[in-house]
Image: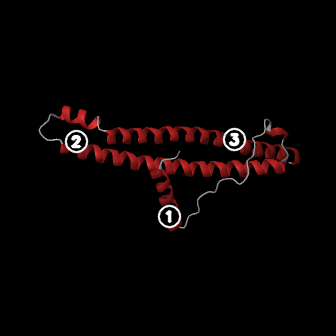
Amino acid sequence: MVDQKVIEFGQHSKELMRALGLVAPMKPKQDLVFPPDLSRVDDDTLGMHLSYWSNACSYAHQKVSVLEGALVLAKSEYEQEYDLRLYAKQGLSISERKILVGASVKIREMKTRIAVIEADLKILKAVLVGYDLKNSAVSREITRRNNERNLRDG
């Protein structure tokens, strides 16, 4: 399940994009399976793949940026809460205060939330690398075909 504050930050990012007059990339409407051999794909289908994978990359990059923004906010919230609790503990050494603050349920929950966001971000970035590689492969195939045509017709 996606963290509610991540969803709220996603809404915030949509509002920001609207305010700036930008259009967020849309999730591809259909799923397209990457072919095992691009050299055997006809030109029209190759064009569809270029459009699909560039759109998928754009969409995934935008989702990565939302998750990164939510992570920044989660870390800031954690640091503020940690500092408030640390300085509220009077009469103890700094080491004792750190131990008490670190043992609090709220601080542990916040650390777990940050860890989950970071783990989700790693997964999303891995998927994005795959999309980028596929998009690059399709683009290279188009370039290869164009160069081949130019040499032949040339």
Left or right position of 30 against 44: left
Q: Residue furthest front?
A: 105
Query: Can you identify the residue that label 1 sits on?
Result: 15
Could you tell which of marks 3 and 1 lies nearer the N-terminus? 1
Q: Residue furthest left?
A: 91
Q: Residue furthest right?
A: 153
Mark toward the viewer: 3 or 1: 1
User: Residue 138, located in which quarter of the rendered image?
Assistant: top right
The residue shown at (29%, 48%) is 80
Disc 3 residue type (three-letter): Lys
Query: Can you identify the residue that label 3 sits on?
Result: 134
Disc 1 residue type (three-letter): Glu
Mark 3, other Cα within 10 Å: few <14 / some 14–19 / many ≥20? some
Could you tell which of marks 3 and 2 lies nearer the N-terminus? 2
Dot 3 falls on a residue whose secondary structure is: helix
* Nearest to the observer: residue 1 or residue 38: 1
Question: How far apart, in angstroms, are the residues tagged by discs 3 and 1?
Answer: 31 Å
Disc 2 residue type (three-letter): Leu
Left or right position of 27 against 120: right
Question: How far apart, in angstroms, are the residues tagged by discs 3 and 2?
Answer: 49 Å
Query: Can you identify the residue that label 2 sits on?
Result: 86
The residue shown at (60%, 48%) is 60
Question: How far apart, in angstroms, are the residues tagged by discs 1 and 2?
Answer: 35 Å
The residue shown at (55%, 50%) is 63
Residue 133, x across and y down, in percent: 66, 39
Left or right position of 58 against 116: right
Could you tell which of marks 1 and 2 lies nearer the N-terminus? 1
Mark 1, other Cα within 10 Å: few <14 / some 14–19 / many ≥20? few
Residue 99, x across and y down, in percent: 24, 32
